[in-house]
């Protein structure tokens, strides 16, 4: 479940990212009534097994079976909630034209990890964003120069150029980051949690700044929910 919007008195339009059919918008009838047969199964962050039938303009959800309880666990914790909100908004934007099984699995895995408090909300979100953007064709480089390919490590990071750049390619005044921060960004991209977790708070904060800038650069109009993430 990516997002929902009200429809009429008691219904909602639910935007779903599905395993096999990409992004789907469907109507959930009567879902806003307290005695709805759907309960809370059609809320954002929920992972559910659905049955739909083809309606006149939108499909209609006839059955919903919860297959995980991530949603409730995430909503109960503010930092998880804001991180999950940024994740579903990103998934929503990245799957504008078509969804993919990879994006679906990445999102479900990140939500599950978040609900279990495995790596902290902020690191989980940063890693998700880097990997989701990579899958969408915008893989950053945190090792070799993203412009000319010169062997790293490099210290200048220019999100508009795709990550680290060598001294020849770096425009004057490019921000420089510590080797620790660049190594952390690489670890978040590959999912090296053992490395990521031992990073200093200041390093994590610097990496978060880079990930946020990289995400905003690639997603037109930016992410509204990223502004609410408590860091
Ligand atoms: Zn270069």
Image: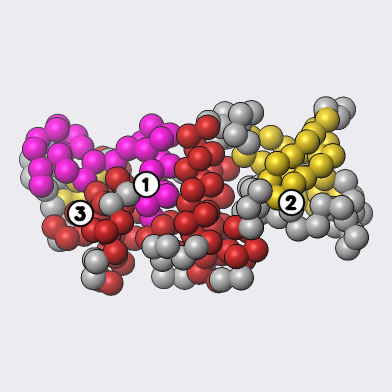
Position of 193 with respect to 120 (left or right) is: left
Q: Is residue 45 above or below residue 198?
A: above
Q: What's drawn in magenta, residue-wise?
A: 126-153
Q: Is residue 103 above or below residue 88?
A: above
Pick whichever, 53 or 92, lies toward us. Answer: 53
| Label annotation for residue 130 | 1
- Residue of label 2: 42
Ligand 1 resides in the quarter of the picture at top left
N-terminal of the pair, mark 3 or mark 2, is: 2
Can you tell which of label 3 and label 2 is closer to the viewer? 2
Query: Residue at horizontal 47%, vertical 70%?
Result: 230
- In depth, the one of 62 and 98 nearer the eye is 62
Q: Which residue is mark 3?
A: 182
Give the camera-side residue of 90 and 101. Answer: 101
* Label 3 – label 1 distance at C-alpha: 13 Å
For label 3, being within 8 Å of ligand 1 is answered no
Left or right: residue 77 compared with residue 130 = right
| Res. 189 visible in picture | yes
Mark before the other along the chain sequence, 2 or 1: 2
Spot occupied by residue 38 in the image (x, y as percentages of width and height): 82, 52
Residue 196's mark? none
Quarter of the image that includes the C terminus: bottom left
Picture coordinates of residue 148, whole percent (x, y) = 14, 32
Q: Main secondary structure of the magenta part?
A: loop
Picture coordinates of residue 123, whole percent (x, y) = 37, 60
- SS at badge 3: helix
């Amino acid at each position: 479940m990516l997002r929902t919007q009200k429809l009429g008195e008691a219904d909602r339009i639910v935007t779903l990212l599905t395993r096999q059919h990409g992004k789907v918008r469907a109507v959930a009838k009567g879902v806003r009534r307290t005695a709805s047969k759907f309960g809370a199964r059609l809320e954002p962050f929920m992972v559910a097994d659905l049955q739909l039938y083809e309606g006149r303009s939108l499909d209609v959800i006839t059955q919903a079976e919860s297959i995980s309880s991530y949603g409730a666990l995430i909503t109960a914790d503010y930092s998880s909630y804001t991180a999950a909100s940024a994740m579903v908004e990103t998934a929503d934007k990245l799957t504008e034209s078509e969804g993919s099984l990879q994006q679906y699995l990445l999102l479900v895995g990140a939500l599950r990890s978040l609900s279990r408090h495995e790596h902290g909300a902020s690191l989980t979100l940063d890693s998700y964003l880097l990997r989701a953007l990579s899958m969408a064709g915008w893989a950053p480089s945190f090792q070799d120069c993203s412009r000319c390919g010169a062997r790293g490590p490099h210290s200048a990071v220019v999100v508009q150029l795709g990550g680290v750049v060598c001294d020849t390619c770096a425009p004057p005044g490019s921000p420089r980051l510590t080797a620790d921060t660049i190594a952390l960004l690489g670890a978040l991209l590959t999912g090296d949690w053992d490395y990521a977790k031992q990073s200093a708070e200041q390093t994590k904060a610097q990496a978060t700044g880079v990930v946020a800038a990289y995400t905003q650069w690639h997603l037109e109009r930016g992410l509204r929910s990223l502004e609410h993430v408590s860091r």
